[in-house]
Image (tube, grey):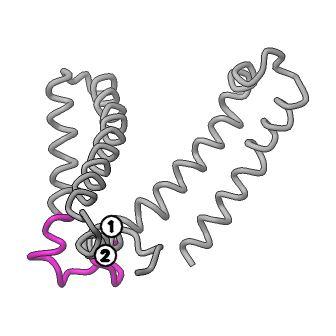
Amino acid sequence: IEPNAGPTLVFQSLPIVFSHLWAGKFFAIVFFGLLLIAALTTSITIYEVIITALQEKLRMRRGKAIFVTLMGIFLLGNVPSILGDNLWKDFTIFGKSIFDAFDFVSGNILFMLTALGCAIFVGFVLKDDAKKELSPTPNSRFTTIWFNYVKFVVPVIILVIFISNLI
């Protein structure tokens, strides 16, 4: 079993491993239960950003914003992922199954762009506020080193990783 297999490792290989363990069913239930809790708690914070943006930018009521967000995620994310192993199993995007393509785009593209955006935002937009949050004395040596690191070094590192993931 390859340790870097991604979704294949979790959803195809690990059930086989659990089936060979003593009390494997128990450990499988605990593992997948914790994985579900991790996914839901992470998703709630992401959904809240989208819901709040819909409320503020489009003046939607909260209930409608929740419905639009969950329906969009269900139709654009969940349905293709579910059908990717059934009816659409022969459908590929750039030679990858739907599930693997979603995993590649989210892990290698969207995640990297989000990290790059955060580093640029903290380094160039939140400069004074970020310095105040780091230290009681905003112009301390540590704050200056950290701030320059986030502003100049981190974006370069993220770009190198991003490009190497695409090659």
Residue appearing at x 20%, y 30% in the figure: 65
Q: Quadrant of the N terminus?
A: bottom left
Mark 1, residue position: 10
Residue appearing at x 18%, y 41% in the figure: 70
Q: Is 71 placed left or right of 5 in the picture?
A: left
Q: Is 68 placed left or right of 133 in the picture?
A: left
Residue 42's place in the image compared with 107, above or below, is above
Q: Where is residue 37 in the image (x, y as percent from the top left)?
A: 29, 43
Q: Determine if residue 99 is in view.
A: no
Residue 13's tag is 2
Q: Determine if residue 80 is in view.
A: yes
Q: Of the residues shown, which amino acid type is indicated by label 2? A: Ser
Location of residue 146 (image quadrant): top right
Q: Is 117 placed left or right of 55 in the picture?
A: right
Q: Give the range drawn in magenta.
A: 80-100
Q: Of the residues shown, which amino acid type is indicated by label 1? A: Val
Mark 2 crowd level (few <14, some 14–19, many ≥20, 10 Å Cα):
some
Label 1 to label 2: alpha-carbon separation: 6 Å
Q: Where is residue 106 in the image (x, y as percent from the top left)?
A: 41, 59
